[in-house]
Image (cartoon, grey):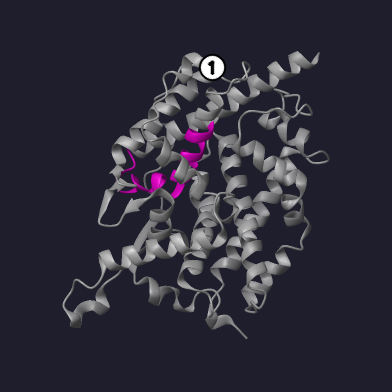
Amino acid sequence: MNDASHAELRGWAARHVLAEDACWVADITFSSQAAGDCQAYPALLLGHHFVRIAYEGAKAIRSRNPNVGWSGLAELLSEQYAPITERARHVSKLLDDTKKSDEVVLAELRAVQEHNTKSLTGKAPRFLRWLESDLGLFSMGGSTVGASMPIAYRLGLDPKDPHTMSGEDLHRVAQEWGATMSVLMAAALEPPSDKATLGLANCGVSYRDRLAAKYLADHYEADFEIELKLLLLMIEGDLHTNRLFLPLTESGHEMPAFRARVVTLYHSLTSLQRIFESHPRCDTPAARSILALFQDEPTRRLLSQGGKQVRNRCVHYEMSDPRIIPDQTLPMFGIIESVNPGTTWHAFNQDVLKVTDRLAECLSGWRLSKSR
């Protein structure tokens, strides 16, 4: 095959990967409608992935590369809430957002904490204020899978009105994302599906309210500001979501779930690296365990240049790398093997699962009561 044929194959693979991701989001959305008390959890715990797919998918469909872009489909995309989608997409990068410094990200988290605390506390009679709360915690099997303040920061939710996102009606924003998914599903020349195949009822998520300052007082390092603790709480929740909630959405959608795991873990690892670089004196047992984990071979492989390339291919759909020659017989069309020579999809996936489990355990155990 010549270079032009390879380019066509890469375009074919790009369209199929984005269609797979869109089908995953659509199935989660339709399935959650019949999930009873669990109906809201998929959007709260996985909504940042929905944003990523909507943003990157729309970008691919609008590409000028004729093998990837599709002007007829691009015309069907709405851009009314594009700024909100772009903002939420960048927030999902944690400290990897090249448009913001670490200080800006942490300042924004602090602002969310102060806004939530002001909105939700100080209203009860003084003798009852010890009962007030400003932080909601979502858990599965005793592990934190999400928290309201990080979720509010990531999606721009208002604690006083959970039906608004970045000042706009959340339902209308979600409708635009849903319409984008329908367009993206059509990119693979397969009819969009409205079937709900996932069993999301009885998901096992529980909820409890806490006061953020009190709950976080003995979490992580003693000298960490509350905004940094909220960032670590976000990472901890994301990793446990990968372990415990994401598998509920995986049946029939193995590759989208894999891509979600890779993106989450990669940004968690790189953000933790930056935290430790700026706080070199961390010395609790859990902190030392995380630092040791960074020296392990699986983690080093994930953070290598090849691992970064895999992350890129799990985020961006358009592929210009001439090394990539898609193979329909391999998971994710052999893209992993192309951009990270010497490994396989199965080996890389095993690294992702192992490091996710270990890192989540370390973060859950990072408490001041366990310091020396």
In this rendering, the answer to whether 283 lies above or below 110 is below
Q: Amino acid at mark 1?
A: Trp
Please state the extent of the stretch shown in magenta in the rendering: 34-56
Label 1 CA crowd tier, 10 Å (few <14, some 14–19, many 20+) = some
| Quadrant in which residue 292 is drawn | bottom right
Between 167 and 213, the one lying in front of the other is 167
Judge whether residue 116 can be spotted in this image.
yes
Q: Residue at x 68, y 31 (%)?
A: 331
Report the residue that reaches farthest toward the right: 342
Q: Residue at x 16, y 78 (%)?
A: 125
Which secondary structure, mark 1?
loop
Q: Please tell me whether residue 35 belongs to the stretch shown in magenta.
A: yes
Between 351 and 168, the one lying in front of the other is 168
Q: Residue at x 39, y 60 (%)?
A: 149
Q: Main secondary structure of the magenta part?
A: helix
Between 234 and 197, the one lying in front of the other is 234
Q: Quarter of the image containing the N terminus?
A: top right
Tell me where residue 367 appears, x and y as whole percent.
Answer: 53, 76
In this rendering, the answer to whether 52 lies above or below 227 is above
Report the residue that reaches farthest toward the bottom: 372
Q: Is residue 50 left or right of residue 360?
A: left
Q: Quarter of the image containing the C terminus?
A: bottom right
In this rendering, the answer to whether 32 lies above or below 281 is above
Q: Is residue 178 left or right of residue 285?
A: left
Q: Please tell me whether residue 334 belongs to the stretch shown in magenta.
A: no
Kindly identify which residue carries mark 1. 70
| Quadrant in which residue 79 is drawn | top left
Tell me where residue 194 appears, x and y as whole percent.
Answer: 39, 25
Tell me where residue 330 appears, x and y as whole percent.
Answer: 72, 28
Report the residue that reaches farthest toward the left: 125
Tell me where residue 78 appears, x and y as whole percent.
Answer: 39, 26
